[in-house]
Image: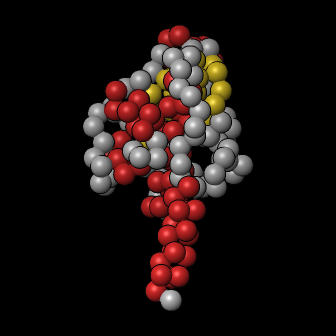
């Protein structure tokens, strides 16, 4: 009986862990920023799901490194800039349907000057020119500074 309970629990945990797996998309130089932005979107979603509040600093994402390593590294290095204090309404996997599609959640660092991929509040990726970005609505309270994220978070 004990082994049956253990097996059931192990299988259940395996399915639950599978829900937070990063995508198996091959990362190339051409898609690195987009993959990192997708990771950042997953960290926002998971943090909001877990904590029931918006992330306010890079340290909030530390516990999600296993789930989204490329995204967290891009934030640490400053290759991607994320917005602080963004309230995520839709914490389901995939693109959000309850969050606005017209506000910027995160962006590749070169977007303000050269254009490039942008993560929208609804967790979809959009390419913007530098001029489009300058006139785009920004989600949240401001940019999170780059730097080290604590593995324990806040």
Residue pictured at 47% horizontal, 61% vertical: 50
Query: Which sits in the foreground, 50 or 13?
Result: 13
- With respect to residue 97, does 116 lie above or below? above
The colour scheme used to paint the residues is secondary structure
**Residue at the right extreme of this rendering:** 97
Query: Which sits in the foreground, 131 or 12?
Result: 12
Left/right placement of residue 84 relative to residue 104 reads left
Residue pictured at 57% horizontal, 40% vertical: 23
Please tell me in which quadrant of the rendered image residue 12 appears: bottom right
Query: Which sits in the foreground, 150 or 110?
Result: 150
* Residue 105 in view in this figure: no
Q: Position of residue 104 (x, y in %)?
A: 57, 33
Residue pictured at 50% horizontal, 47% vertical: 44
Residue pictured at 27% horizontal, 37% vertical: 148
Please tell me in which quadrant of the rendered image residue 84 appears: top left
Please tell me in which quadrant of the rendered image residue 147 appears: top left
Left/right placement of residue 153 relative to residue 2 reads left
Numbered label tally: 0
- With respect to residue 4, does 146 lie above or below? above
Q: Position of residue 60 (x, y in %)?
A: 37, 49
* Residue 149 in view in this figure: yes
**Residue at the bottom extreme of this rendering:** 1
Q: Position of residue 21 (x, y in %)?
A: 53, 48
Q: Quadrant of the C terminus?
A: bottom left
């Amino acid at each position: 009986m004990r082994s049956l309970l253990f097996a059931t629990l192990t299988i259940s945990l395996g399915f639950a862990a599978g829900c937070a797996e990063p995508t198996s998309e091959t990362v190339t130089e051409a898609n690195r920023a987009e993959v990192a932005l997708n990771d950042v979107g997953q960290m926002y979603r998971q943090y909001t799901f877990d904590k029931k509040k918006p992330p306010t600093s890079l340290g909030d994402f530390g516990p999600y490194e296993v789930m989204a390593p490329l995204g967290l590294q891009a934030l640490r290095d400053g290759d991607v800039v994320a917005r602080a204090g963004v309230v995520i309404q839709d914490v389901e996997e995939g693109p959000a349907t309850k969050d606005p599609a017209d506000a910027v959640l995160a962006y590749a660092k070169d977007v303000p000057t050269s254009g490039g991929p942008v993560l929208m509040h609804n967790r979809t990726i959009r390419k913007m020119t530098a001029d489009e970005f300058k006139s785009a609505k920004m989600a949240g309270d401001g940019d999170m500074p780059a730097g080290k994220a604590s593995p324990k978070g806040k």
